[in-house]
Structures are given as structure tokens and as C-alpha cells.
Amino acid sequence: MPETEPKTGEDVPGLPARRLAATLIDEVLKARLALDETYERLSPAFGLDAADAALARAIAITAFRRLGTIQHAINARLERGSPRNSGPFEPILVAAAAQILFLDVPDHAAVDLAIRHLHEDARSSRYVSLGNALLRRLARERDAILSEAVDPFIDTPEWLAESWRATYGEATAAAIAASHRDEPPLDISVKDDASGWAEKLDGLLLPTGSIRLRERQGITGLPGFDEGTWWVQDAAAALPVRLLAPKAGERIVDLCAAPGGKTAQIAALGANVTAVDRSGPRLRRLRANLERLGLSAEIVAKDATTWQAEPFDAVLLDAPCSATGTIRRHPDVAWTKTTEDRDKLAALQARLLEAAARLVRPGGRLVYCTCSLEPQEGEEQIEIFLAEHPDFARAPITPEEIGGLSEAIDRNGDLRTLPHQLKHETPRLSGWTGFYASRLIRL
């Protein structure tokens, strides 16, 4: 693979997509921002067509999914380490390595476009020869690199690996880490007739009632989308509303409700639901989702920690969290969150739980949930809350309520789903988000 000289960068097919991919990787790691939000903010400026935009996003997601393996492979082959003051050298190489090692991209294309990209910045152009030699070596040694990456924790930051070992034990922690290497499944919730829609969509009907699509495809073109028959929602994320068990005519509030999957579930069951969230943009998305589904809710743009109302029959609090249970779907989470983030969010969750408790009528239900694997954001929150609120008690979950999946119920009767559960012979059709939920009753 000869070293490529810079030419007409804008006219080289595929190069704009690589520019966006490297920019996303760099921005997310430096600013510790969510990849999806960064993509939405930055991608319009690159003017890519749908195919190139999808490729850029796929490169970035793959880079974060296997970032530990990629960084180890690169660092082991740089005798003096990554050069200083080299501008975009590192993110360009990470993006190229993701293509060479894990994506169906010809090696010569990945190397050629990376070298052209390096030439575009005066700081990185000084290291074109180094980058070219390194990427060619990665391509030659791909099989060896992948065969050596057997440690399931290689793509997991150490603080998360330690947390999971301490919480779940070595074997379960390793299974969680290994599951994050696989592409996530795509699940949907339906208003009714789940078995019928599973057949129409060629999906798997899960024990919990969600439908898992067998093939990755454009969502908006599938039967039932325009009619508002179903919506995308991870199977584990659909469980808290099942535990809340809304009844027709009940007054129910969904706190921190956007983007609205759980609000839609409650409304579809005939309850009178109030959706509260402080984010205006996220509430606009919630409103648009409800309009497509033909469902209604009272929408309130307020901070749930201070919002007040007459007590409700039931309260659902899906609290903001570190989202470590979503790493398989959002692999950037592993590299952007820290223990400090977790602890700050845990303090916010405690305030939200206090506010939620005030909104529950006597005899009413409260379901608290987070998509986090960290006990500080789940089990420990509820233990502290119950110790301080003798007027609340657990209503333990039974296996029958969640499709007989007893492995997802902990010793206290709370829900604890883990990413490696819900096994299927095909890795992409296995697993679900890591979720915690506790159902409480106000005495």
C-alpha cells in the first residue's frame, strides 16, 4: 500500500465520512459528551448523504465498542508512543483501525483515506509515514490482534470492571463485559396483538411481550409505523410500566418522561398520564412520538425535583443515571462516564425519589428505575429510601409479571436485568439493557 499524497480532498469518495468519524471520536473523548448528541450537532456541517453519514456513525460506534482493543493494538506498535502535538493523528488512526479490525471495509481504502486525512492538518501531516506504517501493520496482523483480545475486560474501563466484579462477581462481570462487544438487538413495543405483529414483522415474540426484529432495516418503512401501531423500545426498558400495572382511568405521572416510550405504554393502557420533563427539546420529541402513535398525555415542562401536584394513583420515576446498562447500545458511555458522574447522579436520584414519593396517594404505587448497572443508582437508593420512609414498603415482583424470567429478579424482589441475559443462539438477538426497578407501595 503506497503512501498516498494529498489531492483534492473534497472530491475523494469516502473521505468526508472519515473526517466526520474521526471528529466524533475526538470530540466525544475530549469533551466526554454523548455520541448521539455530538453526531446530531456536528453532522449537518459535513453535508454527507445518508449512506456516508451512516458509515461515519458506524465507524465511531465501532471504535467506542472496541476502543480498548484498538488502543492496545496501536500502543503496542508505537515504540515511542503517540507523538505529541500531532493534532488529529490519534482519532484518525483509531477510526482507521476500527475499519481495518472490525468493519467490512477494504484495508487499502481504510489506509488510503486515513493518510489523505492526516495530510490535511499540518500537525498530523508530519507523521504520515508513521501512520501509514502502523495501519499497514494492523492490516497484516489483524488475525493475531483479534485472537489475542480474549480478555473480556479489555474494552471496559477499569473503574467499571472493578464495580461489576464487586457487585456481581467475576464470572457475571466478565459475561456483562463480553456482551458489550456484540451489536445490540432492536426491540419494539406494540399497542396490542403482539403475536400478530411479531408475525407481520418477522420478529421474535419475547416472553415479556416485546417484539425483537430479526433483521436490521429502516424502521420508518416497516408495516405499522405510519399507522402508529408500535414504537422502538428496548425489552428491558418496557418492564417498569408492566410492574406499575396502569389501569384504565387511573391518574399516573411519568417523571423524567422524555423521549416518551414509557409514557406511550401508560397511555396505550387507557390511563390518564402526565409526562414531566425539564428538557424542552426532549419534550418536543415526546410530543411528536405521541402524535404518531395517536396517544395523548398532559405534558409538563418542569423540574421534577420541585414540581408539585395533587397525589396520583401511581408514579413512575425513570431517573437520570450513568446509563452503564446501555453500553451495548451506546458504547461511548463506557468512555465518557466516571465515578464522579455516578455519584453526582446518585445525589440527584435521591432528590427525585423524595419528590416522587410526595406525589403518591396513600395506597398508591411508585416504581423507581434506572438503566444503570451500578448499585449506587439502584439497590442502594431504595435501601436508603425505605430506611427513611416507613410509610412505604416493597411490593415484590413475581416471575409471572415478566414472562417467567426469574433470573431478572433479585433477592429483595426487585428487577435487575443484566446485558447477557435473555439468551438466543444468535448473539445479536440475545441480551437486553441492564435495568434496575423497584416497586413500592405507600401504606
Image: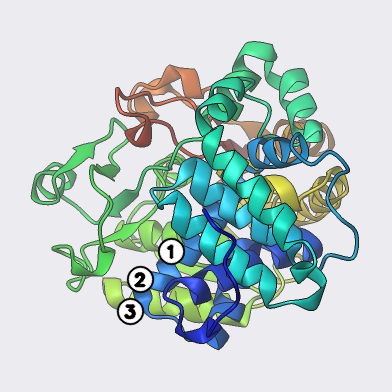
Q: Earlier in the sequence, mark 1 or mark 3?
A: 1
Q: Earlier in the sequence, mark 2 or mark 3?
A: 2
The residue where tag 1 is placed is 55
Q: Position of residue 275 (x, y in %)?
A: 52, 69
Tag 3: amino acid: Glu
Q: Tell which residue pokes out farthest to the front in this image.
A: 2
The residue where tag 2 is placed is 51
Tag 2: amino acid: Ala
Q: Are marks 2 and 3 in contact (CB under 8 Å)?
A: no
Tell me the mark number nearer the camera, choosing from 2 and 3.
2
Tell me the mark number nearer the camera, choosing from 1 and 3.
1
Q: Alpha-carbon neighbours of circle 2 within 10 Å: few (<14), some, or many (≥20)?
A: few
Q: CA distance from mark 2 to mark 1?
A: 6 Å
Tag 1: amino acid: Leu
Q: Alpha-carbon neighbours of circle 3 within 10 Å: few (<14), some, or many (≥20)?
A: few
Q: Position of residue 356 (x, y in %)?
A: 68, 56
Q: Is residue 105 left or right of residue 193?
A: right
| Residue at 21% across, 37% down | 204
The residue where tag 3 is placed is 291
